[in-house]
Image (cartoon, grey):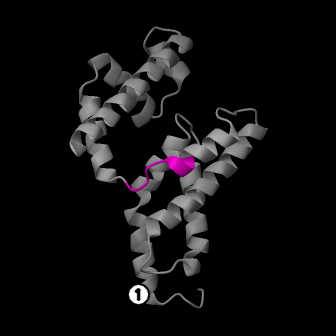
Amino acid sequence: MAEKDNPEELQAYVTLMTRHQGRLRVFIRSLLPGSPDVEDVLQNTNVVLWQKRTEFEHGTNFLAWAFRITRYQVMSQHSRNKRDGKLVFSDKFLEHYAETTDTDRSYDQILNALDQCLGKLSPTQRKIVDARYETGQSIEQLATDNDCTAGSLRTSLHRIRESLKNCVKNTLSDQQK
């Protein structure tokens, strides 16, 4: 155990880490949409957060500090994906998006807006979203199960995600009025 680790600080740190897992996951997912690497990046982030626990100053903004570490882990995963030929976004775009993402917005507000917007989907759209994101079913398997091509399913998922993104944005905007 590191010098600075006393039981009270260690417990407080563990509490902060566990309290913010959902927000870190959502942040990673926003930077790596549709990627199967989200959980790996979260796990790597947690390892680094634990390793750097003595560098965190209690009483400061843990979430901002954790987001900064998460951003580096996403960039590392992005570099690995790029080497493997899986590049989706340019490095410049990803860095800009990560820096400008509204990390201060209430996580609960976003989740509530998303829940409302998911409720507005048609039963077919909801079935596709649930199968893809809740169970992690592959596009190919989903396409087979729904008697369609993988390409048409990708197009449908893209449209559904865009619709959800716009709905969440509008819902949050309406809440601020």
In the displayed structure, would residue 173 be above or below residue 74?
above
Closest to the observer: 148 or 62?
62
Q: Which x, y percent locates residue 139? A: 53, 22
Q: Which x, y percent locates residue 38? A: 54, 45
What secondary structure is found at the residue carrying circle 1?
helix
Q: Is residue 99 magenta?
A: yes
Q: Image check: 162 left or right of 87?
A: left
Closest to the observer: 175 or 32?
175
Quarter of the picture holding the N terminus: bottom right
Please count the marks in the image: 1
Residue that numbered label 1 is attached to: 8
Residue at (44% x, 47% y) in the render: 26
Q: Amino acid at mark 1?
A: Glu
In the displayed structure, would residue 87 be above or below residue 80?
above
Residue at (54% x, 43% y) in the render: 31
Q: How many C-alpha atoms fall within 10 Å of the one at disc 1: few (<14), some, or many (≥20)?
A: few
Can residue 142 be seen here? The reply is yes
Quarter of the picture holding the C terminus: top left
Residue at (51% x, 48% y) in the render: 100
In the image as oriented, which residue stretches furthest toward the right? 83
Can residue 130 be seen here? The reply is no
User: What's the magenta region?
Assistant: 98-104
Q: Which x, y percent locates residue 11? A: 41, 80
Q: Which x, y percent locates residue 102? A: 43, 50
Q: Is residue 128 magenta?
A: no
| Residue 55 location, quadrant | bottom right
| Residue 2 location, quadrant | bottom right
Residue at (28% x, 39% y) in the render: 173
In the image as oriented, which residue stretches furthest toward the front? 177
Closest to the observer: 44 or 67?
67
